[in-house]
Amino acid sequence: MCIIRPYKDSDASVLWAIYFHTVRHINIRDYSQAQVEAWAPQSFDVAVWRQKMLEISPFVAEMDDQIVGYVDLQSNGLIDHFFCHHQYQGRGIGRALMAHIFAVGRSQGIKRYYSHVSITARPFFEHFGFKVVKTQQIDVRGQTLTNFVMEKIENTDE
């Protein structure tokens, strides 16, 4: 069973590990070695990462007392980070995180969700009703990566 809770500062290093290993082990399917190394560099500034996590205030997923994923939802509907542990994929963690942010979004009156989605994550987001708004090329530490601006508009006829 997946439990979702608010972020704590002590989660920062575990969330970095999830981010790093997911990019390096999962996104390598759709991006080159050089691209994933630029996206998730071997060395990182812990203080910068901690500050980013404080800014986005993610929700953290736990399974069997282990942190297995995280997601954030900003007040404007932006999903900035959405990562599931590379060894726990396909176990419903992403589905639970997505359901959680939709519930939070409903309580906050969010009608439009959007994200900058990797090639790898695009089918997952499409499964939850997100549509590609545009394909883009972004520069990350000297590497050009393709991703998609995707959005989901909630039905306002309810």
Image (cartoon, helix red, strand yellow):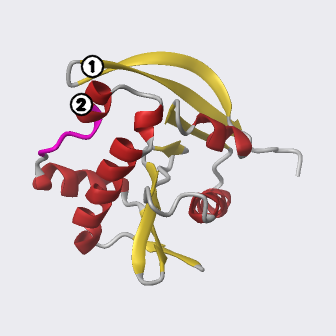
Residues at discs 1 and 2 in contact (Cβ within 8 Å)? yes
Q: Main secondary structure of the magenta part?
A: loop
The residue at 50%/50% (across/down) is 75
Q: Where is residue 62 shown, x and y percent of the image?
A: 46, 75
Residue 23 position within the rendered picture, expressed as x and y whole percent measured from the top left: 37, 43
**Residue 59 shown in magenta:** no
Q: Position of residue 134 (x, y in %)?
A: 58, 18
Residue 40 forms part of the magenta stretch: yes
Report the residue at 53% width, 25% height from top. 148
* Residue 107 left/right relative to 27: right
Front-most of residues 77 and 37: 37
Which residue corresponds to mark 2?
A: 38
Which range is magenta?
A: 39-43
Closer to the camera in the image, 110 or 17: 17
Residue type for callout 1: Gln
| Mark 1 → mark 2, Cα distance in angstroms | 7 Å
How crowded pointer 2 is (Cα within 10 Å; few <14, some 14-19, many 20+) is rated as some
Q: In this view, does 154 lie to the left or right of 16?
A: right
Q: In which quarter of the image is the N terminus?
A: bottom right
Which residue is tagged 1? 143
116 lies above or below 73 = above
